[in-house]
Image: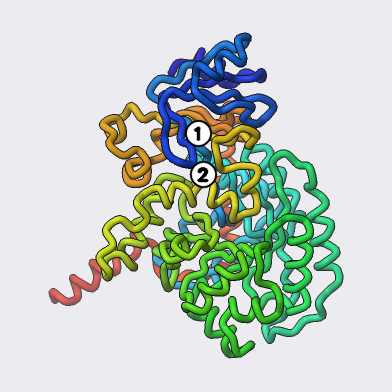
Amino acid sequence: MNRSERDLLAAPGPLLLEPDKVLLPEGPVDGWAVVVRDGRFEAVGPVEEVRRARPGLRPVRLPGRLLMPGFVDAHHHLTQSFGAALAFGEPSEIFRRVWVPLEGALDEESAYTAAKLAALEALRGGFTTVADAGTRAGVDVDVVASAARDAGIRCVLGLVCNDADETGGGDGRPTVLEGAEKHLARHDGDPLVHASLAVSIPEAATEETLRATARLAAEAGAVVQIHVNEHLAGVERSLVRHGARPLEHLHRIGALGPQLLAAHATLLTPRELTLLADTGAAVSYNPVASAWKGNAVAPATAMAERGIRFGLGTDGTRGDGFRLAEAAEFAQRLAYGLVNGDSSCGAGWTWLEHATSGGADAVGLGARTGTIATGMAADFLLVDIDTPELALSWDLPWELVRRGNRDQITAVFVAGRLRLWHGGPVDWDGPALVRRAAELARSAVERADVTRVHPTSTTARALHGERERSTAR
């Protein structure tokens, strides 16, 4: 596709797009077209049918392209992008040693820049929606909202509602719930930012606040994002403090329901899987985070079989939707498939579905995005399938999971607007943002009291060499 075609796609008026294939919920179809108008899919159907109904629209032919839903990142921390590489080689529960001090060192400009940088990486990886689990930076959360809007990504924006101290006590501060109510109302009607509430971990909020945030979110049609069963230490703290595992505790106090988005949800017992299925709670399955810093892999194939709602999340690890889908399948294969002889582990389509429509449902936007269908938000990708990896196609969904990557994404649309073209923003300066982020990140990390257990790879290699030389002597 040349620049004139890019200009056609960036035009403000309605678009009649005719790709080679369209990825529908039931699979890819040939010879279909879509009409994008006012941020939504006005029509989705066979080319001739769509053309006849709209003779005044000029078709935009997209040979060699797949039009598919944008990916949904069901768990992110946008203001942690300055320290993404600090997590490499680190043991679990790094939030205490890395993320809390790093976010605490951010001012308004650096928080905005970090969030916009993360949004850019997400868009480059085909994510049209991200769920931000709340920032600990001492800035108004609207700074993150502004960064998402300016980047052009859809954002489910969490407001942290922690109010408990280290012993589990707290005053149930009225200001927390007042802030939650204002946050939920503040973004009502926003085309890109959708309000959410968040609690870092169950023990970070009093029982009163956990119940109240669940109620407020349910009434507003929003979600409450809580890290649950991410690490063994968190499960053990809950057992000591409450005599129950985290999900059991949330259920016992009345905070487990369809409004809950449980981040990670690893280390689940059969009883906890039943609680998730029975209450309609949703999960963010974060396979790369499990590999990089977790204690276990969420049993996502078991969740799928039992009808548990879940999406896929990056947890800020890397922003490539195709690689996330591949990691989701790969982690299930290693953790569960090898021991019971399951060679398909979801048959490919499972991970595409939960990376798109399933993820949208998990973050509370299932009626708005995640599917190529009439009336849905026009959040979609144009993917080059005329490549060595995908051209000889026998089973495109499986191939997208196993062989897709962000380099094959030609264009990213959010709310009907072209946002990225071949990895670069079309209406703002991406390289300038990256340069500014590099400057601000250095000073922020220097200010933060970050404690790392593992040395850098270069230092580790030098230490290894010293040990070898010492042994030789």
Q: Residue at x 78, y 60 (%)?
A: 219
Q: Is residue 259 above or below residue 242?
A: above
Are there few (<14), some (14-19), or many (20+) residues within 10 Å of tag 1? many
Mark 2 and mark 1 in contact (Cβ < 8 Å)?
A: yes
Outermost residue to the left: 472
Q: Amino acid at mark 1?
A: Leu
Residue closest to the eye, 114 or 416? 416
- The mark found on residue 381 in the picture is 1
Are there few (<14), some (14-19), or many (20+) residues within 10 Å of tag 2? many
- The mark found on residue 23 in the picture is none
Q: Secondary structure at mark 2?
A: strand
Residue 180 falls left or right of residue 94? right
Residue 135 falls left or right of residue 339? right
- The mark found on residue 71 in the picture is 2
Q: Residue at x 51, y 79 (%)?
A: 271
Q: Position of residue 268 (x, y in %)?
A: 48, 75
For marks 1 and 2, the one nearer the N-term is: 2
Q: Amino acid at mark 2?
A: Phe
Dividing the picture into quarters, in which one does residue 51 lie? top right
Query: Visible in this render: residue 179?
Result: yes
Q: Position of residue 91 (x, y in %)?
A: 43, 72
- Locate the C terminus by quadrant: bottom left
- Locate the N terminus by quadrant: top left
Q: Position of residue 96 (x, y in %)?
A: 57, 72
Q: Secondary structure at mark 1?
A: strand
Q: CA distance from mark 1 to mark 2?
A: 9 Å
Q: Position of residue 288 (x, y in %)?
A: 42, 59
Q: Residue at x 63, y 59 (%)?
A: 133
Q: Residue at x 77, y 56 (%)?
A: 220
